[in-house]
Image (cartoon, helix red, strand yellow):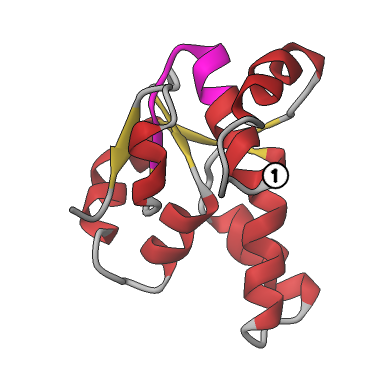
Amino acid sequence: MAIKWLLDASAVLAWLQQEQGSEVVDEVIDESAIASINATEVVHKLIHQGATPEQALEILERLAVPVVDFGPAHLRSAARLSQIKGLSLGDRACLAMADTMGIPAVTADRQWATAGPPVRLIRG
């Protein structure tokens, strides 16, 4: 499978919870990956919503979405994105990795639309 999309934690959580925009994630999930930092973010949010660590990890594994390691190759792009106010570490990691991979990031965060790298918003 060729990876064509990089999922942000917000997109995965919207999909898991069947929130607005989950249908967009349905369209792309089979050709998507998630950055290791954003996978950690999903697990963290699930635990804070009441899942045990084991349950949260199992939910992430059942998605069957490849987890791509954030590494030194992504640092330069992430550093450039640090100049944009309001982006969290997870935001910058996802955008930087998507930019480096040459694919769009999929997110619920509207602010990303003006960050630079290509983005597909799941909510209008």
Q: Which residues are magenta?
A: 97-106
* x 74%, y 29%: residue: 69
The answer to which image quadrant residue 57 occupies is bottom right
The amino acid marked with disc number 1 is Leu
Q: Is residue 32 above or below residue 16?
A: above
Q: Is residue 39 left or right of residue 104?
A: right
Q: Where is mark 1, residue-wise?
A: 89
Is residue 99 part of the magenta span, yes or no?
yes
Q: Is residue 66 left or right of residue 5?
A: right
Q: Residue 118: percent from the left, percent from the top?
A: 36, 24
Q: Is residue 115 left or right of residue 50?
A: left
Q: Residue 124: percent from the left, percent from the top?
A: 18, 53
* x 31%, y 49%: residue: 25
**Near-viewer residue (116 or 99):** 116
Q: Quadrant of the image for the N terminus?
A: top left
Q: Is residue 87 above or below residue 49?
A: above
